[in-house]
Image (tube, rainbow, N blue to C red):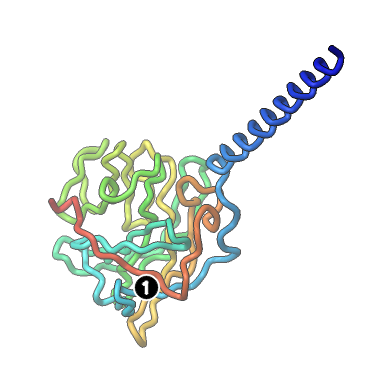
Amino acid sequence: MGDVNQSRRTFLKSLAIIAGASMVVGLLRGLEVLVPPSVGLTSFPTLQLVDENGNPIKASDVPVNGQKMAMFNYPLSNEPNYLLNLGNDSNQPVEIPATTVTIPATGKTYEFPGGVGPSKSIVAYSAICEHLGCTYPELTFYPPGVKALTFNGPMDKVIHCSCHGSTYDPYRGAAVVTGPTTKPLPTVQLKWDPSTDYLYAVTMIGPTIYGHTDDLSGGSPISGNSTSVTMLSNPALG
């Protein structure tokens, strides 16, 4: 009888150990979802903007006023951004000046460097809404004359998210125009080479990308020294 009881105790102890180990594994797998992967990069890369065939994008070829939505990943492979050549009501590029942008969530400010390119009209912003992470096609640019239905009434010349109504001003560093967002869209700082008309992404400015505690974590590095720009239709234009 003693041997039987001892065997039973040993068996139950083994079950407890296995159950405990399974619980630990389950918790660790849960943490893989809750905690982003470790840092994918240690610094912001300088990546040339190229088309889907690997040919350099020229600043003078970026469509004015979002006739096509140009999108590229930066700084990691799962972080989409909009490349915008902003213009006026006549579809002529306009200079986008440097400005101070406020983060309503914290009251802090940062300096938006303004546009680049021959007309200083080209800017790039995160294509992930800072409210709850919606992206293209719900988040898109409404060019001059095309009205988004915002909480402040119909508005054009804005980046608007139809998911929950957040609106941003791309002419002023993607500053918040209407909530529920409390953060501007992060800016991709661009570099323009006037000798070649080529464009490069060099760093991020402003609040962190939605869902990240660090712009350099939570994804895989982009291979090589370039990132591909994809031209998509603008849903605001129907």
- Viewer-proximal residue, 63 or 227? 227
Q: Name the residue under label 1.
A: 49
- Viewer-proximal residue, 20 or 130? 20
Residue 4 % position (x, y): 80, 16
- Name the quadrant of the N terminus: top right
Q: Is residue 238 above or below residue 190?
A: above
At 40% from the left edge and 62% from the top edge, which residue is drawn? 73
Residue 180 % position (x, y): 37, 36
Residue furthest out toward the bottom: 195
At 33% from the left edge and 41% from the top edge, which residue is drawn? 166
**Is disc 1 surrounded by few (<14), some (14 to 19) or many (20+) residues within 10 Å?**
many
Q: In this view, does 67 lie above or below 174?
A: below
> What's the residue type where badge 1 is placed?
Leu
188 to the left or right of 36: left
At 27% from the left edge and 66% from the top edge, which residue is drawn? 85
- Viewer-proximal residue, 133 or 9? 9
Callout count: 1
At 83% from the left edge and 19% from the top edge, which residue is drawn? 6
Residue 16 % position (x, y): 72, 25
Residue 161 % position (x, y): 29, 44
- Viewer-proximal residue, 78 or 138? 78
